[in-house]
Amino acid sequence: MVAPPGLNAAATAFLFLLTITVVRSDKLKTFKGSYGVTRSFDDNIDYYYRILKLDKNATIHNNAIQLTPDSSGSGDIVPKQNQSGRAFLPQKFKLWNGDSNTTRLASFNSSFLINIFRPTNDTPGEGLAFFIAPNLNLPLNSYGQYLGLTNASTDSEASNKIVAVELDTAKQDFDPDDNHVGLNINSVRSVKTTSLSRFGIELVPKGTRLYNVWVNYDGVKKVLEVYIANSSIDGPTPAMPGEPVLKQDLNLALYVEQESYFGFSASTGSDIQLNCVRKWNLTVTSYVKDEVPVLAIALGVGIPVVVLLVVGAGFMVVYLRKKRRKRGNISSNILGALRSLPGTPREFKFRDLKKATNNFDDKFKLGQGGYGVVYRGVLPDEENLEVAVKWFSRESLKGEDDFLAELTIINRLRHKHLVRLLGWCYKNEKLLLLYEYMPNGSLDMHLFAEPGKQPLSWALRYKIVSGVASALHYLHNEYDVRVVHRDVKASNIMLDSNFNARLGDFGLARALDNEKTSYMEAEGVLGTVGYIAPECFHTGRATQRSDVYAFGAVLIEVVCGQRPGTKIGGFQFLVDWVWFLHRDGRILDAVDERLAGDYVAEEAERLLLLGLACSHPIAHERPKTQTIVQILLGNMPVPHVPPFKPAFIWPAMGPIEDDDLSLATTLDTTSMTTSNLGSAWSTQNMGKDSHEQSLV
Ligand SMILES: *[C@@H]1O[C@H](CO)[C@@H](O)[C@H](O)[C@H]1NC(C)=O
Ligand SMILES: *[C@@H]1O[C@H](CO)[C@@H](O)[C@H](O)[C@H]1NC(C)=O
Ligand SMILES: *[C@@H]1O[C@H](CO)[C@@H](O)[C@H](O)[C@H]1NC(C)=O
Ligand SMILES: *[C@@H]1O[C@H](CO)[C@@H](O)[C@H](O)[C@H]1NC(C)=O
Ligand SMILES: *[C@@H]1O[C@H](CO)[C@@H](O)[C@H](O)[C@H]1NC(C)=O
Ligand SMILES: *[C@@H]1O[C@H](CO)[C@@H](O)[C@H](O)[C@H]1NC(C)=O
Ligand SMILES: *[C@@H]1O[C@H](CO)[C@@H](O)[C@H](O)[C@H]1NC(C)=O
């Protein structure tokens, strides 16, 4: 799509470098640890003393971590009353990163088998907790109600940086009872508690009872859940119950240190109990900085500078060439073409448009771009018809050829999912076009609305992408000449009053802005690059296949609520992250969290898989629009998507299609250049008889 070959190569090289440097800097890493699971505590005491850090009177004994002293064999010199202890994995985990606005949180699952036991049949006390802490130090005097977490002077201090799930067996005046689970943040006064008796759970019954506890934290949804199930000493781990005993929204980044430890703590008071952890599984998935090899740094810093210079030089060449091409009598050409437009568009008086837009009042402005400005207008003589008035800048009219091509094409297209041209006005070299007004703006405005606004519902999202698919199908196959849109992206998808999608261009299209011929300038590299098929960097040509690629990016964007160029999960592009989740068998983790689970899972999976299929790096592997429409209707299954994203191969070794052939011979690079930047509308005749076809 970009003109000079040097420019293509440079842009490709630049993107490639970007990929290596960025992907290397931030990636998802999963830690898995098991303690007492395959290696028993009893047979590996030395090992566990080495790999776990036990604080104060905590021991490994009786095939368990004893967080507080048990009846340690014959010696039994350590009193059991007023004790506290901790056991840690002495390894810091990165629990969040980014600054406070762009935080990404780690997720973790901790599941453990506990046995809280009354050695005498007296009242038990006090409790056991799984917790996250900034250091390995047990506070002094953290026995009794403090559970080894805090003490009388530090309790409630934000500087504790402790988040814990307590299993509390002694009632304090702030506790609901002596058998509850609670979420503790910097304090033993829980922010949330659940009494366990109604779940049939008695933490410390008379006799021996074991429980399996799951503390699961989802850092994407920012939710912590605790589950508890009856278990037994040597039996298998029970299935996790369907319902959590405690569930709480929790942004860990607000409370714990960026790098923290995981562990257990427990205490006794005047009343005692044994606090035993018999098995522990811990899985932590966090974002970590990868080591950046020296070579990558050198490339990342050195070559892009050179590449930018090359790209800049490319622009100059294009610019100068365009300048030379500029022709004399623009006015008469345009006016002639406008007057001969077939069909409905009418000529409007400048005076009327001035009135309609309140003298082109800034308050009526809908959008602005290289092409000029778009205003909302109300035509009093047309029953207050609302229109979008696009006033082309003088500069933009210099690309007369492209402009006329756009105009003639859009004027002839008729489809309920395309924005319609209503009329035009040309006076004193001022050109204005009138389009149907789209009261709901563009799709991106809704997908990325500020927090607090109602997110676009699932049903509307599905309806919108279905509309876009049918518009593309029309352009590619049903209209009398085949049209390649070339700039399918969320900001070009307009929404009418019923949220029907209308593929259009105003607002961001830069059709006529042919002095600026780069992706980079359009919306920043990433914003636009995410929609561009990889082969375009080599061919500089848009095809129906590259439209499908862009549509795939829109599909994924709509489901995830993230822009295609979003760096996420350590990946440079959204699509790569979704592909990774697909491989991991959890593609639905990609669904926009603003939907808060309110979506149809089957449809979401369908859109995501279809999005991946459309994002196939090899153009001829992408589905065609007729298939896409059928899949969206649910009439056809989604194509198989391989677990790993196939490599981009150039030149592609696929079957040569008619489309490709005709394109290769009929497209001229210059027109591609201007269009990318891009006209929403431009055509190429794609039939075999393309040379005979006239566009007007
Ligand atoms: C256990 O706790 C007692 C009382 O708090 C203390 O005197 C003793 O030193 C502790 N033992 C160990 C091994 O830390
Ligand atoms: C335990 O601590 C409480 C107060 O903190 C005290 O009254 C009690 O005597 C202590 N018990 C023992 C055995 O040290
Ligand atoms: C974070 O957001 C706040 C409020 O939205 C803003 O004032 C602040 O500058 C942002 N900080 C960073 C590092 O972007
Ligand atoms: C935790 O478990 C849940 C459900 O069992 C799973 O969906 C999630 O991926 C797990 N998270 C981690 C970090 O392993
Ligand atoms: C720990 O993980 C292993 C293997 O993944 C599993 O068999 C075992 O049941 C788990 N144990 C607990 C207590 O969750
Ligand atoms: C609480 O713990 C801190 C840190 O261990 C200690 O400095 C402080 O003296 C303790 N406070 C009480 C009341 O024991
Ligand atoms: C756990 O086991 C005990 C005793 O077998 C039973 O009374 C209780 O209902 C069980 N609890 C659950 C949640 O299954």
Image (cartoon, rainbow, N blue to C red):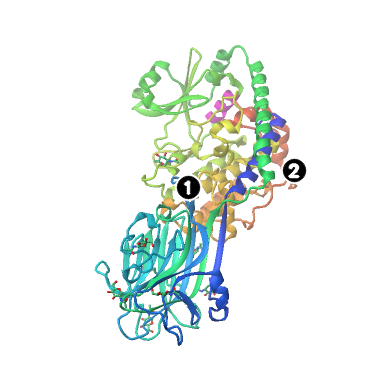
What main secondary structure does the magenta stretch of the protein show?
A: helix
Q: Residue at x 45, y 85 (%)?
A: 75
* Residue 405 in magenta stretch: yes
Q: Earlier in the sequence, mark 1 or mark 2?
A: 1
| Left or right relative to 193: residue 682 | right
* Residue 413 in magenta stretch: no
Which secondary structure lies at badge 2?
loop
Q: Assess disc 1: are there few (<14), some (14-19) or many (≥20) residues with their C-alpha within 10 Å of its C-alpha.
A: many
| Amino acid, disc 2 | Pro
Ligand 3 has an atom within 8 Å of the beta carbon of the residue at disc 1: no
Q: x%, y% of residue 637? A: 57, 58
| Amino acid, disc 1 | Gly
Camera sees residue 680: no
Q: Quadrant of the N terminus?
A: top right
Name the residue furthest bottom: 74
Q: Which mark is residue 651?
A: 2
Please say if 269 is above or below 609: below
How far apart are the alpha carbons under marks 1 and 2?
A: 33 Å
Which secondary structure lies at badge 1?
loop
Q: Quadrant of residue 340?
A: top right
Q: Which residues are magenta?
A: 402-411
Q: x%, y% of residue 490? A: 50, 40
Camera sees residue 141: yes
Residue, disc 1: 561
